[in-house]
Amino acid sequence: MMGQKLLAKVAFLTAMLFTLNVLPLDLNLQKKEEDTLLKARQLVQDGDLEGAVNELQRIIAVLLDNPAERERLAEAYYLLAKVYYTAGDHELMERHLRNVFTTDRAFTTFEPDLYFKEIVDRILSEFPDITRPKQPEPEESSSGTNIISKEKKKKRKPPVLLILGGIAVITTLILLFAKKKKPDTKTGSIRIMSNPSGADISLDGNKTSQKTPYTLNFVPVGPHTIRLEKTGFEVYEKTVIVEANKEERISATLETFWSGVEWIQIPAGSFKMGDSYMIGTPDELPVHEVYLNTFYISRYEITFQQFDRFCEETGRGKPSDNGWGRDSRPIIFVSYSNAQSYCQWLSEKTGMDILLPTEAQWEKAAQGTLPRIYPWGNGEPDCSRSNFRGCNGMTMPVGSAPAGQSPYGIHDLAGNVWEWCGDWYSEDYYSNPEATGDNPTGPDYGTTRVVRGGSWGMMGNALRCSNRRGESPNYSSYALGFRVISTTPPAGQNKASRTGR
């Protein structure tokens, strides 16, 4: 035991002496460096990119401290750039190409048919003092792998001290680190395809800059989670186990994003807005003509099921259901800003332009193009047409009063819950010139936002199509929810749209 420790100390001291006195004088090690570069080139040709990277990183680490070896260092960087080009990592490729010309401004390329010549030319343009690459020198062997000139192949006889130093280093490594040798890192690849293509790729929670189809190279062996995201489609996730030097394949069929919204088309045209029957309040007058472009509105009020998913994906707290139940009941206890945030999230998920309706859009969806008191017509409200005071004493699942739908087939525009609109509220807005015209959006400012449609706790007079009032944007209650509109057509929705009468 003592003998082994003594031998280790002697070997270590010898190695230190070798390093301090001999290594700086003979660091060129030309034959070894030449062999390493040749080996790296052969590994590239054989397709063993991982092996080539290991060899090149080893020779670069040696050459970095030797100013006299700039040409070999530049070639090592060049080969490393070629490896990363083959692997599809253009960022690392360009970084190492810049290292080439930063290391040796007169670097000579040995490949006249360089397959990333345009990239080299662009990088060269960033170094105006660089001499353009020379023509390739004739190769010295028929195999095409010997690229070192005759002058660089002069051999030097290794001194005795160099041999002794090498023996000492090897002995030291054997005695001190034999049991601590770590296995080489192994990698594989993952080929990722999707239908439709163009999905953003994330690996283990880290978003890459790549889109499908794409192959991720140099992925460490073991389990990895692939996540695909594309606007308008559900997120796709799958875990694969990567094996060394093997390619795993993922072929994903992306499902259309579920918004839960059934869209109804409201065709472009004019209608009379306001209290045509003179039975309401002054803020509903004067009656005025409004023209609206085509838009799409949700057939039902936004439900807890829809809003809860928004909360889960954004990390928000879920509003209370007041003990009445969730699922298909309309969302309640939402402020104006809550409703706006939902619209923004749904826009990002679907790629559509989703908003709260203007009160002009809301009123046209409720009454159609001909004046009527209620969405279903002029008949008095009853519980088959609306959920209002005296019916249930709470919200009901959306669509529970089908007899009360509007001319376009839209449900619950009267009763169940009040609905947020996008406009600021003003009592005398209808008297302003901007209220009459194309696509009015309400006053430019105010203190309250428009709400429409009445609720489960209101009397029948509040259910009228023209009835309007304002609430503070921060207000929320168990009688206030919302529905949404879109100014862009939803995919595949044309067959489900209806025309007014």
Image: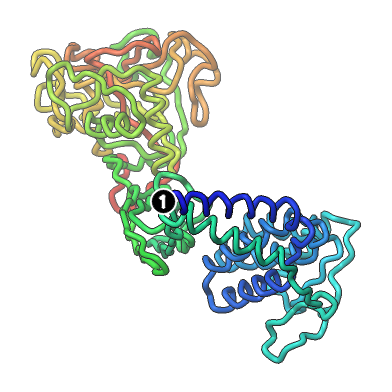
Q: Nearer the viewer, residue 68 or 370?
A: 68
Residue assigned mark 1: 1
At 39% from the left and 16% from the top, the residue drawn is: 450
Q: Nearer the viewer, residue 249 or 212?
A: 249
* Residue 380 visible from this viewpoint: no
Q: Residue furthest bottom?
A: 142
* Residue 381 visible from this viewpoint: yes
Instruction: State which quadrant residue 179 falls in.
Output: bottom left
Image spot of residue 467 (x, y percent): 31, 16
Image spot of residue 447 (x, y percent): 46, 8
Residue 371 shown left or right of residue 392 in the figure: right
Q: Nearer the viewer, residue 367 or 454?
A: 454
Q: Nearer the viewer, residue 37 or 105?
A: 37
Image spot of residue 473 (x, y percent): 40, 13
Instruction: State which quadrant residue 199 falls in.
Output: bottom left
At 29% from the left and 22% from the top, the residue drawn is: 317
